């Protein structure tokens, strides 16, 4: 059960490309950061095949897109951005990638991880979910559970001092029908749009504002809020267990008995 006021102390977002976070969850991140949450972005690729211009090289494109991603992160108050520089357009959910993600999860020990849904293939009638998005989501989910929390898996990481870590909750980006948790982003949607605009090489002359507002309004429909981002939330560590593993844990901030759809 998720508290209506639940704000994690720390969160990690794992995505395939620069701009994936801004399209999907930057409103949530902006809100959590305002409330004191420490956030880290993990970018699996640097979007190096994402600029189709004559004479553009992958190396130059990666440089441009990493700079845009850093600027976008700064808009919502995130300063820790890690680029794993896997090849854009060729991302695969391999054991090697799983281990790289386990390393980051054990290093930063986030309370919450936000990632995509590896099972999403068809989106509406005019888009197929990018294979990199599916691979990134699969790698993230497989690293979170159970790998990151198993001390005898990737024990060489344990020997480096990167001890096992259990992620408390996974926020899986969801289309509205699959979602069970709607984060109210009415106060941070402008930051979300501003952060999206930092991806100049992708936006070009396109103004993302009408579309972002349309999507966020659709997610918020019937929920007493103007704009929302939608998730399916998986709780991997119960409130009771989380309390045991967290010294100074404030129960009133994290346990809630409310029923039904959660509107954060
Ligand atoms: Zn993408």
Image (cartoon, rainbow, N blue to C red):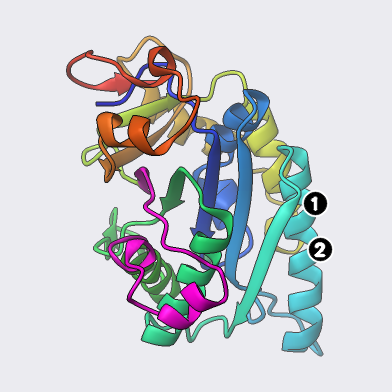
* Neighbours of disc 1 within 10 Å: few (<14), some (14-19), many (20+): some
Q: Is residue 41 above or below residue 221?
A: below
Asked if residue 150 is among those painted magenta in the image, a careful observer would answer yes
The answer to whether residue 41 shows anywhere in this view is yes
Q: Is residue 234 left or right of residue 205?
A: left
Q: Quadrant of the N terminus?
A: top left
**Above-or-below relation of 225 to 89:** above
Does residue 204 appear anywhere in the picture? no
Find disc 1 in the rendering and name its residue: 71
| Left or right: 171 as drawn, with respect to 160 | left
Front-most of 195 and 250? 250
Q: Quadrant of the C terminus?
A: top left
Where residue 30 sits in the image (x, y, percent)? 63, 33
- Residue 146 lies left or right of residue 75; in this view the side is left
Residue 38 placed where, x, y %? Answer: 63, 39
Whole-percent x, y for residue 129 in the image: 36, 65
Give the residues in magenta: 144-172
Within 10 Å of disc 2 (Cα), the crowding (few <14, some 14-19, many 20+) is: some
Q: Which element is circle 1 on?
A: helix
Residue 187 position by quadrant = top right
Q: Does the CB distance between marks 1 and 2 fall below 8 Å? A: yes
Cα distance, mark 1 to mark 2?
6 Å
Disc assigned to residue 148: none
Q: Relative to 109, is 132 above or below?
A: below
Tell me the residue that label 2 is attached to.
67
Label 1 CB less than 8 angstroms from ligand 1: no
Q: Secondary structure at mark 2?
A: helix
Q: Position of residue 135 (x, y in %)?
A: 38, 74
Residue plotted at (75% across, 81% down): 53
């Amino acid at each position: 059960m998720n508290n209506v006021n639940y704000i994690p102390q720390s969160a990690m977002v794992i995505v395939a490309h620069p701009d994936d976070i801004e399209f999907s969850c930057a409103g949530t991140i902006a809100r959590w950061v305002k409330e004191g949450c420490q956030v880290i972005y993990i970018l699996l690729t640097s979007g190096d095949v994402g600029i189709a211009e004559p004479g553009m090289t992958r190396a130059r494109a990666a440089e441009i897109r990493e700079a845009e991603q850093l600027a976008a992160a700064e808009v919502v108050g995130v300063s820790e951005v890690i680029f794993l520089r896997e090849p854009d357009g060729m991302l695969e959910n391999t054991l090697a990638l799983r281990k790289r993600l386990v390393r980051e999860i054990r290093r930063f020990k986030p309370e919450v991880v936000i990632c995509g849904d590896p099972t999403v293939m068809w989106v509406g009638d005019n888009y197929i979910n990018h294979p990199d998005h599916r691979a990134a989501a699969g790698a993230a989910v497989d690293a979170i559970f159970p790998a990151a929390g198993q001390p005898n898996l990737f024990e060489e990481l344990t020997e480096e001092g990167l001890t096992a870590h259990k992620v408390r909750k996974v926020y899986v980006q969801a289309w509205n029908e699959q979602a069970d948790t709607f984060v109210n982003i009415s106060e941070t949607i402008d930051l979300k749009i501003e952060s999206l605009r930092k991806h100049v090489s992708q936006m070009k002359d396109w103004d993302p504002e009408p579309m972002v507002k349309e999507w966020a309004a659709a997610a918020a429909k019937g929920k007493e809020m103007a704009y929302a981002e939608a998730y399916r939330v998986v709780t991997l560590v119960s409130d009771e267990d989380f309390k045991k593993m967290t010294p100074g844990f404030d129960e009133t901030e994290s346990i809630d008995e409310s029923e039904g759809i959660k509107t954060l």
